[in-house]
């Protein structure tokens, strides 16, 4: 017996709050369309927090973090194109502690 799918809006808002992300259409798109917005270089990473324009992105390991640090400028440009100016103004990369 499967569960019926329902609207995700309320659940998404709770999830965004749990991760410290403001609830807005741009932030919801950041979460739902991350792979498309960020591009293939950022595959395997996850946006985990956005506060005051500062985005925290988790990656699986140190080598990935080192490689992506050189691509932050490119990511900011891509996010500006996809989300608008000043939604994301800075990026911090951290290695996930639970992968």
Image: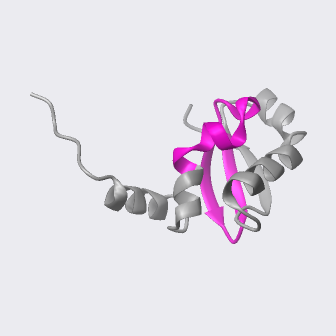
Q: Is residue 56 magenta?
A: yes
Rendered view: 96 above or below 7: above
Q: Magenta segment, which residues?
A: 31-58
What is the quadrant of the N terminus in the image? top left
Residue ID at (61%, 43%):
34
Tell me which residue sits at (40%, 56%) in the image. Answer: 12
**Does residue 95 appear in the picture of this structure?**
no
Residue 44, by quadrant, is top right
Q: Is residue 47 magenta?
A: yes
Residue located 48% across and 60% down the image = 16
Q: How is the image coloured?
A: one colour
Compared to residue 4, the image places residue 41 above or below, namely: above
User: Residue 98 occupies which quadrant of the picture?
Assistant: top right
Q: Quadrant of the C terminus?
A: top right
* Residue farthest to the left, as pictured: 1
Q: How many labels sit on residues?
A: 0
Q: Nearer the viewer, residue 67 or 6?
A: 6
Q: Is residue 36 above or below residue 50?
A: above
Front position in the image: 94 or 42: 42
**Does residue 45 appear to the left or right of 89 in the view shown?**
left
Q: Position of residue 78 (x, y in %)?
A: 77, 47
User: In the depicted view, which residue is nearer to us: 86 or 15?
Assistant: 86
Q: Is residue 16 left or right of 71 when viewed as pictured? A: left
Residue at image position (42%, 56%) is 15
Q: Residue furthest bottom?
A: 52
x and y percentages locating residue 56 in the rendered image? 68, 53
Is there any visible trace of residue 36 in the rendered image?
yes
Q: Is residue 59 left or right of residue 90?
A: left
Location of residue 46 in the rendering, given as x and y in whole percent from the top left corner? 61, 41
Q: Position of residue 50 (x, y in %)?
A: 63, 61
Q: Is residue 25 left or right of residue 95?
A: left
């Amino acid at each position: 017996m499967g569960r019926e799918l329902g609207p995700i809006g309320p659940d998404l808002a709770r999830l965004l709050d749990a991760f410290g992300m403001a609830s807005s259409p741009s932030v919801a798109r950041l979460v739902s369309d991350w792979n498309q917005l960020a591009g293939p270089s950022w595959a395997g990473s996850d946006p985990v927090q956005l506060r005051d324009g500062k985005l925290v992105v988790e990656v699986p390991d140190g080598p990935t973090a080192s490689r992506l640090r050189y691509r932050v400028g490119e990511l900011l440009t891509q996010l500006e194109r996809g989300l608008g100016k000043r939604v994301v103004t800075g990026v911090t990369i951290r290695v996930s502690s639970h992968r």
